[in-house]
Amino acid sequence: MNQVDYLRISLVDRCNFRCQYCMPEGADLTYALQQNLLTQDELIRLLQSVFIPVGFTRFRLTGGEPLIRPGVVEIVRAIAQLPETQDLSMTTNAFLLADMAQGLYDAGLRRINISLDSLQPEVFDAIIGHHGRSRWQQVWDGIQEAYRVGFNPLKLNVVVIPGVNDQEVLDLAALSIDREWHVRFIEFMPIGNDYLFSDRGWVSSEDLRQRIRDRWGLTDGQVRGNGPADVFKIPGAKGTLGFISQMSECFCDRCNRMRLSADGWLRPCLLNETGQLDLRTALRSGVPLHELRQQVRDLLELKPQINYKERDSGTTGTYSRTMSQIGG
Ligand code: SAM
Ligand code: SF4
């Protein structure tokens, strides 16, 4: 079992997109009340006095869409300035990134993952559930600006859905050839999207790799790295291709993370909520910080037995909470 030192922090459960696979029309989206979101001060206090002392040193900001969180640049700065922070990154849809990339970089953010499911504006808009003037160009501008500002590595996340964007897999993979961009294909998961998942199904990483091998060949980069992705390369490419295969292969044994939701729930696993802790209520009701540290330590001890092999649904079942609510 890996050392658990990586915390995914959701800054907000809302989003400016409605991706079909994440927040589909008709999904039961109950948002946390504004007053129940952890404030910046509460978040920093939890990091300094609870998470860092028990061994967390690597943090990723996510959501919902983290860039819609008021004060996000200040939150980045505060976390980047903690002396124990070894790594700080963000996952974003990049819609607001063109104007914010420089500020985020100056505040201390160095690594960024951007969701980009299509290079075709009309397909992109259909995926993100947007009607009206296309949003694709603004996202693309955000990606270019992040690259110009110097984010490295710059990773692009693609969720592949059969019949929606799987015909673009080679075009998306090709983005890794000329630039040091890391394109990561994520197997589509049945999380809060029953209709789409049962209608479309999912494509396995091995299927995608075969298509890429047939076109260019594929050399191994670093396989089974310190994260969920298996990393490969198109021969001669500047960037890499990552495959996150949580459907076809269980990587619970290399899981090194926990998740903190925007309203302060600490969850040990994406799909299994055993042992989850309500840190916001505990903090606000004055539970001493040393007790919170102990509760988190106890959860860390328990974590090896908590995995999504024993989650409440199989790979053909669905899970009702959406990724944006879990803090994906
Ligand atoms: N809004 C940001 C974004 O889209 O990058 C951050 C939050 S989003 C929930 C984090 C990641 O979860 C994204 O890369 C997204 O593609 C992924 N995701 C959401 N729903 C998913 C699903 N059903 N299956 C696989 N990945 C999913
Ligand atoms: Fe929003 Fe990200 Fe979910 Fe898309 S994947 S709806 S951008 S939180």
Image: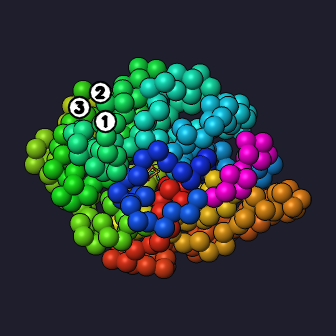
Q: Nearer the viewer, residue 216 or 47?
A: 47
Q: Nearer the viewer, residue 277 or 197?
A: 197
Q: Are marks 1 and 3 in contact (CB under 8 Å)?
A: no
Tell me the chief SS of the magenta region: helix
Q: Is mark 2 within 8 Å of ligand 1?
A: no
Identified at 31% across, 30% down, the residue is 137
The x and y percentages for residue 244 are: 36, 55
Q: Are marks 3 and 2 in contact (CB under 8 Å)?
A: yes
Identified at 50% across, 56% down, the residue is 324
Residue receiving disc 2: 179
The x and y percentages for residue 280 are: 75, 58
Query: Is residue 150 among the parts visible in the rendering?
Result: no
Front position among marks 1 and 2: 1
Residue 176 image-quadrant placement: top left
Identified at 31% across, 36% down, the residue is 133
Residue receiving disc 1: 133
Question: Mark 1 or mark 2, which has the lower sequence index?
Answer: 1
Residue receiving disc 3: 177
Check the image and report above or below for 213 versus 109.
below
Check the image and report above or below for 309 versus 192.
below
Q: Amino acid at mark 1?
A: Arg
Q: Are marks 1 and 2 in contact (CB under 8 Å)?
A: no
For the residues labelled 3 and 2, the Cα–Cα distance comes to: 6 Å
- Range shown magenta: 32-45
> Is residue 208 in the magenta section?
no
For the residues labelled 1 and 2, the Cα–Cα distance comes to: 28 Å
Q: Amino acid at mark 3?
A: Ile
In the structure shown, which secondary structural element does the residue marked by tag 2 occupy?
loop
Q: Residues within 10 Å of mark 1 (few under 14, many from 20)?
A: few
Front position among marks 1 and 3: 1
The x and y percentages for residue 230 are: 35, 52
Q: Amino acid at mark 2?
A: Arg
